[in-house]
Image (cartoon, grey):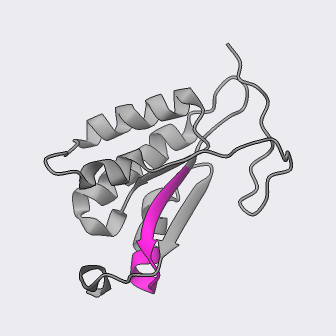
Amino acid sequence: PLRRPRPAYNPSSISDPDYVRIFDTTLRDGEQSPGATLTSNEKLEIARMLAKLGVDIIEAGFPIASPDDFEAVRQIANVVGNEVFEDGYVPVICGLSRANEKDIQIAWDAVKGAKLPRVHTFIATSPIHMKD
Protein backbone atom coordinates (compact mmCIF):
# COMPACT_ATOMS: atom_id res chain seq x y z
CA PRO A 1 0.00 0.00 0.00
CA LEU A 2 1.13 3.52 -0.73
CA ARG A 3 1.76 5.97 2.07
CA ARG A 4 -0.02 9.25 2.51
CA PRO A 5 1.78 11.86 0.38
CA ARG A 6 4.44 13.73 2.29
CA PRO A 7 5.95 17.15 1.62
CA ALA A 8 9.26 17.23 -0.27
CA TYR A 9 12.22 17.00 2.09
CA ASN A 10 13.72 20.36 2.93
CA PRO A 11 15.95 20.27 6.02
CA SER A 12 15.00 23.74 7.19
CA SER A 13 11.24 23.77 6.69
CA ILE A 14 8.13 21.66 6.21
CA SER A 15 5.67 23.01 3.66
CA ASP A 16 2.66 21.23 5.18
CA PRO A 17 1.83 22.68 8.64
CA ASP A 18 -0.01 19.46 9.55
CA TYR A 19 2.94 17.20 8.79
CA VAL A 20 5.09 15.86 11.64
CA ARG A 21 8.59 14.82 10.60
CA ILE A 22 9.83 11.73 12.47
CA PHE A 23 13.52 11.73 13.49
CA ASP A 24 14.34 8.30 14.89
CA THR A 25 17.41 7.68 17.08
CA THR A 26 16.85 3.98 17.84
CA LEU A 27 20.06 2.83 16.14
CA ARG A 28 22.23 5.19 18.17
CA ASP A 29 20.39 5.67 21.47
CA GLY A 30 19.28 2.07 21.63
CA GLU A 31 22.83 0.88 22.23
CA GLN A 32 23.28 3.19 25.18
CA SER A 33 21.14 0.91 27.33
CA PRO A 34 23.23 -1.45 29.48
CA GLY A 35 23.80 -4.75 27.71
CA ALA A 36 22.25 -3.61 24.42
CA THR A 37 24.52 -4.22 21.45
CA LEU A 38 23.58 -4.73 17.83
CA THR A 39 25.53 -6.25 14.97
CA SER A 40 25.85 -4.36 11.69
CA ASN A 41 23.36 -6.76 10.09
CA GLU A 42 20.86 -6.19 12.92
CA LYS A 43 21.25 -2.42 12.50
CA LEU A 44 20.70 -2.74 8.75
CA GLU A 45 17.55 -4.81 9.32
CA ILE A 46 16.20 -2.30 11.87
CA ALA A 47 16.96 0.57 9.45
CA ARG A 48 15.02 -1.26 6.73
CA MET A 49 12.07 -1.69 9.08
CA LEU A 50 12.19 1.99 10.07
CA ALA A 51 12.15 2.91 6.38
CA LYS A 52 9.25 0.53 5.78
CA LEU A 53 7.39 2.35 8.58
CA GLY A 54 8.06 5.63 6.76
CA VAL A 55 10.40 7.25 9.28
CA ASP A 56 11.63 10.49 7.72
CA ILE A 57 15.12 10.66 9.26
CA ILE A 58 17.07 7.67 10.55
CA GLU A 59 19.97 8.58 12.83
CA ALA A 60 22.08 5.55 11.96
CA GLY A 61 24.81 6.01 14.57
CA PHE A 62 27.84 7.92 15.81
CA PRO A 63 30.45 7.08 13.13
CA ILE A 64 33.50 8.35 15.02
CA ALA A 65 32.75 6.07 18.01
CA SER A 66 34.45 3.06 16.41
CA PRO A 67 35.35 1.54 13.04
CA ASP A 68 32.37 -0.83 13.45
CA ASP A 69 29.99 2.09 14.04
CA PHE A 70 31.39 3.91 11.00
CA GLU A 71 30.93 0.81 8.84
CA ALA A 72 27.38 0.19 10.08
CA VAL A 73 26.36 3.80 9.33
CA ARG A 74 28.05 3.62 5.91
CA GLN A 75 26.25 0.38 5.09
CA ILE A 76 22.86 1.80 6.12
CA ALA A 77 23.51 4.93 4.03
CA ASN A 78 24.56 2.94 0.98
CA VAL A 79 21.75 0.39 1.21
CA VAL A 80 18.69 1.80 3.00
CA GLY A 81 19.54 5.35 1.95
CA ASN A 82 19.21 4.31 -1.70
CA GLU A 83 16.15 2.05 -1.51
CA VAL A 84 13.49 4.24 -3.09
CA PHE A 85 9.94 3.10 -2.38
CA GLU A 86 7.19 2.95 -4.99
CA ASP A 87 5.83 6.31 -3.83
CA GLY A 88 9.25 7.98 -4.20
CA TYR A 89 10.04 7.96 -0.47
CA VAL A 90 13.60 7.38 0.64
CA PRO A 91 14.66 8.10 4.23
CA VAL A 92 17.24 10.69 5.18
CA ILE A 93 20.22 8.86 6.68
CA CYS A 94 21.91 10.79 9.45
CA GLY A 95 25.18 10.40 11.33
CA LEU A 96 25.71 12.00 14.72
CA SER A 97 28.80 14.16 15.20
CA ARG A 98 30.38 16.37 17.81
CA ALA A 99 30.84 19.92 16.53
CA ASN A 100 34.45 19.60 15.42
CA GLU A 101 35.97 19.25 11.96
CA LYS A 102 37.31 15.69 12.35
CA ASP A 103 34.01 14.27 13.66
CA ILE A 104 31.97 16.08 11.01
CA GLN A 105 34.22 14.75 8.22
CA ILE A 106 33.99 11.18 9.53
CA ALA A 107 30.19 11.46 9.84
CA TRP A 108 29.95 12.87 6.31
CA ASP A 109 32.15 10.08 4.94
CA ALA A 110 29.80 7.54 6.53
CA VAL A 111 26.51 9.03 5.23
CA LYS A 112 27.48 10.59 1.90
CA GLY A 113 26.44 7.50 -0.08
CA ALA A 114 22.75 8.04 0.78
CA LYS A 115 20.41 9.90 -1.57
CA LEU A 116 19.54 12.18 1.35
CA PRO A 117 22.57 12.32 3.69
CA ARG A 118 22.61 14.42 6.86
CA VAL A 119 25.05 15.14 9.68
CA HIS A 120 23.55 15.91 13.07
CA THR A 121 25.96 17.86 15.27
CA PHE A 122 25.96 18.49 18.99
CA ILE A 123 28.03 20.58 21.36
CA ALA A 124 29.75 18.34 23.89
CA THR A 125 29.15 19.26 27.52
CA SER A 126 30.18 15.99 29.13
CA PRO A 127 33.94 15.67 29.89
CA ILE A 128 34.01 12.26 28.16
CA HIS A 129 32.55 13.75 24.94
CA MET A 130 34.98 16.70 25.00
CA LYS A 131 38.01 14.41 24.61
CA ASP A 132 39.44 13.65 21.16
Residue range in magenta is: 93-104
Considering depth in this image, is 34 or 72 the residue closer to the camera?
34
* Near-viewer residue (124 or 121): 124
Residue 71 drawn in magenta? no
Position of residue 48 measured from the top left corner of the image (x, y, whole percent): 45, 32
Using the image, determine if residue 123 lies above or below residue 115: below
Image point (46%, 81%), residue name: 123
Vertical position of residue 30 compared to residue 119: above or below: above
Above or below, comparing residue 123 to residue 35 in the picture: below
The residue under the point 31% across, 54% down is 71
Q: Whole-percent x and y of residue 102?
A: 40, 82
Q: Is residue 94 magenta?
A: yes
The percent position of residue 98, horizontal first and vertical second, equals 42, 77
Q: Residue at x 32, y 59 (%)?
A: 70
> Which quadrant: the C terminus?
bottom left
- Residue 49 vs residue 1: left or right? left
Question: As drawn, is 109 to the left or to the right of 55?
Answer: left
Task: Kindly indicate the quadrant of the structure image that contains residue 110.
Answer: bottom left
Q: Is 52 positioned to the left or the right of 89 in the image?
A: left
